[in-house]
Amino acid sequence: SLLDIVNNNNYQIDGYGACDGTVACSTCHVVLDQATFDAVNKGITEEEKDLLDMASDVEATSRLGCQVY
Ligand code: FES
């Protein structure tokens, strides 16, 4: 996942991935370009949609980074 890439490469993004991919925090929120969103949008769950509803600055191409593979 995008969260794994951040963690495995020691990128220092303050607070990113606070729940470690358990779909409980939305700190991994990312806004993708349309082509990327279309390529990875298969399999978005209701749980992810519900959490995105509570995230700030959500756009049409938003995803949770821990759920993007
Ligand atoms: Fe918490 Fe993705 S890391 S929802």
Image: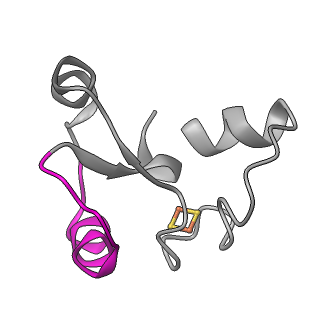
Name the side, left or right, on which 7 lies relative to 66. Answer: right
Identify the residue at image location x=87%, y=37%. 10
User: What colour scheme was applied to this rendering of the protein?
Assistant: one colour
Name the side, left or right, on which 21 lies relative to 41. Answer: right
Q: Where residue 32 appears, x then y in whole percent?
A: 31, 34
Identify the residue at image location x=52%, y=77%. 25
Q: Where residue 53 appears, x then y in whole percent?
A: 22, 76
Quarter holding the N terminus? top right
Q: Where residue 13 appears, x then y in whole percent?
A: 73, 50
Q: Where residue 37 appears, x then y in whole percent?
A: 23, 31
Quarter of the image where one finds residue 22: bottom right
Magenta span contains residue 53: yes
Identify the residue at image location x=22%, y=67%. 49
Magenta span contains residue 25: no
Name the side, left or right, on which 53 lies relative to 32. Answer: left
Q: What span is in magenta? A: 44-60
Above/below status of 69 relative to 53: above
Name the side, left or right, on which 9 lies relative to 38. Answer: right
Q: How many numbered marks have been drawn onto this rendered protein structure? A: 0
Above/below status of 33 relative to 65: above
Which image quarter has ligand 1? bottom right
Can see residue 17? yes
Identify the residue at image location x=42%, y=40%. 68
Quarter of the image where one finds residue 33: top left
Q: Nearer the viewer, residue 9 or 42?
A: 9
Q: Nearer the viewer, residue 39 or 35?
A: 35
Can see residue 1? no
